[in-house]
Image (cartoon, rainbow, N blue to C red):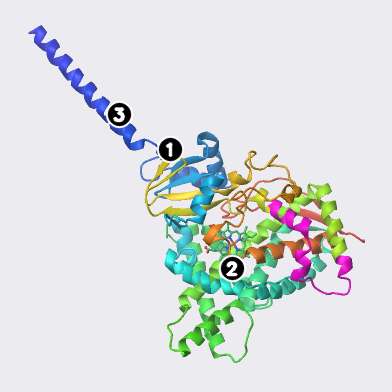
């Protein structure tokens, strides 16, 4: 009897051992070559950790930085119910951003998609994106950039004129104001005196704050408030468009161009080029894409220069020469900006160090293999631009502000501040122009001292924004 019992026990143990061994083997196979990383808790994954980072002064990139340190150049995580794979090598940037295989498409997290609207070129399907991008790209022609430079310069001269009496200014606040005004003027000929501008500014700020929020639509949530702000903006844009259609005055702005092109197509018996809803979503997209990014970049640039006096002195020498040459000219031209080699490197170095858009999101359309790892259809794939920008194997002393590092051409796919490939930033030339014009007027008019060297970033900000706003004490050079 005892022998029988021992036999049953042994065979049961053997069976259990076999089942466990088989399960282990199956598990190993199913996760073979899957990127390392944690998928976190069931359903919510690592969303809480992500939100915790968003809500801290280290900023949401801290979530990625910690995992990059732990797992290396390729890791996976799960946020907002979806799998994300982060990649930080120039080789993967090339393959994914150029997308010659057609296996990837752009995709933003759900909250961003709903806030900018599903007709925005940020969220459009690849085919639709091509059409919209084609229409919008015409708006960014050389002649349009030239006209914009003149307008922007005029506005900067006016703003800096007011700094004289201020003593201490908060650069971020000023830059947000300047870039917002510039976007409103360029897109819809709205002047700062127009009462609608202030309302739009507040609503755009609410949308930006909601971009990384949980997409929960309850009245007290950040996301809900962002959606309400979006609705108000879309209504306002609708009214502006109706007024334009009834008005006899011809304006020279992006909105007028889109409406006129559309009217032309319709009167030739062709279908509408862009529906009103498409125009509205894309005007909103351009305000959001152009204001916060450029203002944040300008702020970081002022901080880096204030903390690197040698660089500032080289830059000032270059810019004073241009100012001397332009004594009889009221405003800068595109030609002047093309003669600013050192300032252009200062802009590039500021963008590299600040990495305003820290990663570039895409979605996987077909199972793929990247860096030896299996990447499944439907996963999100994010090119971690910030890690590439701060990789010591690519940029020597990456935390040193050294514009001269760009004397030599950067390694391909190592400078991703504006992205590369078919989704490259549409406003790249305007953004560079704004930064250069601002630099020229600032360094030829003022000396400044950064009053708070803290590099903490604002909570809930989609783009890396300095929490202090970068207060500076300014003094006229000739004062
Ligand atoms: C320093 C300022 C700026 C930075 C750092 C910046 C950066 C970027 C980045 C990284 C992307 C995404 C690229 C990708 O996913 O591959 C992007 C897209 C875009 N940007 Fe900018 N941007 C800036 C200013 C502007 C301005 C001034 C405008 C226009 C008014 C603008 C309009 C756009 C648009 C429309 C897109 C979407 C392009 C598409 O999906 O086809 N940006 N920008």
Pointer 3 or 1: first along the chain: 3
Per the image, the residue denoted by label 1 is: 38
User: What's the CA distance linking mark 2 and mark 1?
Assistant: 36 Å
Report helix, strand or loop for mark 2. Answer: helix
Q: Which disc number belongs to residue 24? A: 3
Q: In percent of the image, x 52 and y 61: which residue is there?
A: 422
Q: Residue 286: where, in percent of width, then height?
A: 57, 68
Q: Main secondary structure of the magenta part?
A: helix
Left or right, 11 with respect to 472, comes to left
| First reached walking from the N terminus: tag 3 or tag 2 | 3
Observer-side mark, 3 or 1, equals 3
Q: Which residue is mark 2?
A: 287
Mark 2 C-beta closer than 8 Å to ligand 1: yes
Residue 64 in sight: yes
Whether residue 212 is visible to the viewer of this picture, yes or no, is no
Q: Residues within 10 Å of mark 1 (few under 14, many from 20)?
A: some
Q: Mark 3 packing: few (<14 Cα in 10 Å), some, or many (20+)?
A: few
Tell me the element at label 1: loop
Up-down: is 296 above or below 370?
below
Q: CA distance from mark 3 to mark 1?
A: 18 Å
The span from disc 3 to disc 2 (Cα, nearest Å) is: 53 Å
On-image quarter of the N terminus:
top left
Which residue occupies the foreground of this view, 103 or 455? 103
Q: Which residues are magenta?
A: 323-350
Q: Residues within 10 Å of mark 2 (few under 14, many from 20)?
A: many
Q: Is residue 325 above or below residue 372?
A: below
Q: Residue furthest bottom?
A: 248
As helix, strand or loop, the secondary structure at mark 3 comes to helix
Report whether the residue tagged 3 is closer than 8 Å to ligand 1: no
């Amino acid at each position: 009897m005892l022998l029988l019992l021992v036999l049953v026990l042994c065979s049961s143990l053997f069976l259990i051992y076999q089942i466990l061994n088989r399960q282990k083997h199956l598990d190993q196979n199913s996760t073979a070559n899957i990127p390392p990383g944690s998928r976190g808790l069931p359903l919510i994954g690592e969303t809480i950790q992500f939100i915790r980072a968003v809500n801290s002064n280290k900023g949401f990139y801290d979530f990625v930085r910690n995992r990059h340190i732990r797992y290396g150049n390729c890791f996976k995580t799960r946020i907002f119910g979806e799998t994300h794979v982060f990649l930080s090598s120039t080789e993967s940037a090339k393959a994914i951003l150029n997308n010659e295989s057609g296996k990837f498409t752009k995709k933003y997290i759900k909250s961003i998609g709903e806030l900018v609207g599903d007709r925005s070129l940020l969220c459009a399907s690849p085919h639709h994106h091509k059409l919209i991008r084609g229409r919008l790209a015409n708006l960014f022609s050389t002649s349009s950039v030239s006209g914009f430079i003149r307008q922007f310069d005029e506005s900067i001269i006016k703003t800096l004129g007011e700094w004289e009496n201020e003593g201490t200014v908060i650069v971020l606040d000023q830059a947000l104001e300047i870039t917002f005004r510039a976007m409103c003027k360029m897109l819809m000929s709205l002047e700062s005196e127009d009462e609608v501008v202030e309302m739009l500014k507040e609503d755009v700020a609410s949308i930006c704050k909601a971009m990384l929020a949980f997409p929960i639509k309850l009245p007290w949530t950040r996301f809900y408030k962002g959606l309400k702000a979006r609705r108000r903006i879309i209504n306002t844009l609708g009214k502006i468009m109706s007024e334009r259609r009834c008005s006899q005055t011809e304006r020279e702005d992006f909105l007028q161009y889109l409406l006129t092109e559309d009217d032309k197509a319709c009167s030739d018996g062709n279908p509408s080029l862009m529906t009103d809803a498409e125009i509205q979503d894309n005007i909103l997209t351009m305000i959001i894409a152009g204001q916060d990014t450029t203002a944040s970049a300008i702020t970081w640039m002022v901080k880096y220069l204030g903390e690197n006096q040698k660089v500032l002195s080289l830059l000032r020498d270059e810019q004073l020469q241009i100012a001397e040459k332009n004594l009889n000219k009221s405003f800068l031209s595109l030609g002047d900006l093309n003669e600013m080699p050192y300032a252009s490197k200062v802009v590039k170095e500021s963008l590299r160090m600040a990495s305003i858009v820290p990663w570039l999101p895409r979605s996987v359309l077909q199972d793929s293999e990247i860096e030896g790892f299996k990447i499944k259809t439907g996963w999100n794939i994010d090119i971690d631009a910030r890690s590439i920008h701060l990789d010591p194997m690519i940029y020597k002393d990456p935390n040193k502000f050294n514009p001269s590092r760009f004397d030599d051409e950067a390694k391909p796919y190592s400078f991703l501040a504006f992205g590369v490939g078919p989704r490259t930033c549409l406003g790249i030339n305007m953004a560079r122009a704004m930064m250069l014009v601002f630099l020229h007027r600032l360094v030829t008019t003022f000396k400044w001292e950064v009053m708070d060297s803290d590099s903490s970033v604002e909570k809930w900000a989609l783009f890396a924004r300095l929490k202090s706003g970068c207060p500076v004490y300014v003094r006229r050079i000739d004062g």
